[in-house]
Image (cartoon, coloured by chain):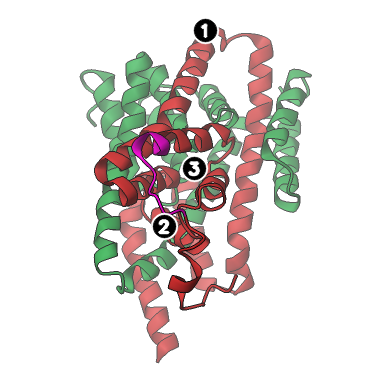
Chain colours: A red, B green
Amino acid sequence: MPSDSPPAALAAPENLSSTPPGLIVLFVAFARMSLAGFGGVLVFARRAIVDQHRWMSADEFNETFALCHFLPGPNIVNLSVVFGSRFRGVAGAIAAFAGLVGPPVVIVTILAVLYARFGEVDALRRVLAGVSCAAVGLLFAVVFRMVMPLIRRRDLVGLVVLAAVFIAIGVVRLPLAAVLLVAIPLSVAITLAMRRRVAA
Amino acid sequence: MNSDGHPIWALAWTFGLMSLFAVGGANSAIPEMHRVAVDVHHWLSDTQFADVFAISQLSPGPNVLIVTLIGYAVAGVAGALVATLSMCVPTAILAYVVSRMLTRSSHSRWPAIIQAALVPLSIGLMGASGLVLALTSDRTLMAALVTAGAAVMAFATRINPLWLLVAGGLLGFAGLIG
């Protein structure tokens, strides 16, 4: 689908669901995508919202997610709130958020109880050690995937900013808030300056 | 800072503030969680932190639920709830307000600029998360090899990540990692 097609009014409406979801439907839909989401809920959220229920077009979903990604905090939590409020206001935001977080919190709390009880059992210790090694690998894979576009377009400035944050937080172990209070204004100023230079 | 008094207030303050600084999502805030939970407050040992990360990756739901586990370790079920809500609610309110503002004046170029500016920051933070977690988890050569193997497999193939976690768990159970 071409992303630059202007007549969205022609393309979208007949495909999209005409009735906005109710509160219970929102809760259940977000609970289901959340419980399906091992290692990240985003894929399942896109599948449910765009493909299955047709509550949003793919472009609308991408725009909404981009907004939620640039805001701080857990992206998918932001998405549930923005999505729920679009259809049902504050109540919709709460219903979607409760669906997303409520059921898995119950599961994770049960796991926490089990861990507190059996965390010293040797076999469990070994299993968790193995899982955490693999999970760290998964995190590195995500980082590589995200770095590739910067390398491909030879975004040297972006890579320097990236490295500076990596060292400040990962190596020097400075507090997050302090680093970002410096890094965010700096990075915004650099981005602005680069765009001005490209435009000029 | 506010660690005198009941630890639940320290949880609320820690994660409430972190919520507003977790650029790029929950995984970006892992170095900060480790710094606060292990180094500053001694809520968890290094090993427990690695365990808690493993459990959060194994369980369904958003990655942010690692804070539920940290909260439980500090103050039981109440701690789990306070940590979870503190980490989610401030940013949820911010998201609600910002999305309302943007639908009214959607022609601003600021969102695109801020977004572009945040991309390298969030990648740097996630890289730092990887480093901090690797230093806590990969204490043997074999452990480091498992991490490297999982990274390569997840990067180069479309395998479901859950299988890589299961494989790591099996290798651990077999005593090949410890």
What residue is shown at x 40% (from left), y 27% (from top)?
A102
When the figure is inspected, residue B131 is found, relative to residue B98, above or below; the finding is above
Secondary-structure class at tag 2 = helix
Give the residue number, with chain letter if any, for mark 1: A117
Q: Position of residue B104 (x, y in %)?
A: 24, 66
Disc 2 residue type? Thr
Q: The C terminus of chain B appears in which quarter of the rendering?
A: top right
What residue is shown at x 49% (from left), y 21% (from top)?
A107
B19 on left or right of B170: left
Instruction: Pinpoint the chain carrying mark 3.
Output: B
Front one among A59 and A135: A59
Disc 3 residue type? Asn
| Of marks 3 and 2, the one in the foreground | 2
What residue is shown at x 45% (from left), y 33% (from top)?
A28
Give the residue number, with chain letter if any, for mark 3: B27
**Magenta-drawn segment:** A17-26
Residue A154 makes an appearance in the image = yes
Q: Neighbour class for label 2 at 10 Å: few (<14), some, many (≥20)?
A: some
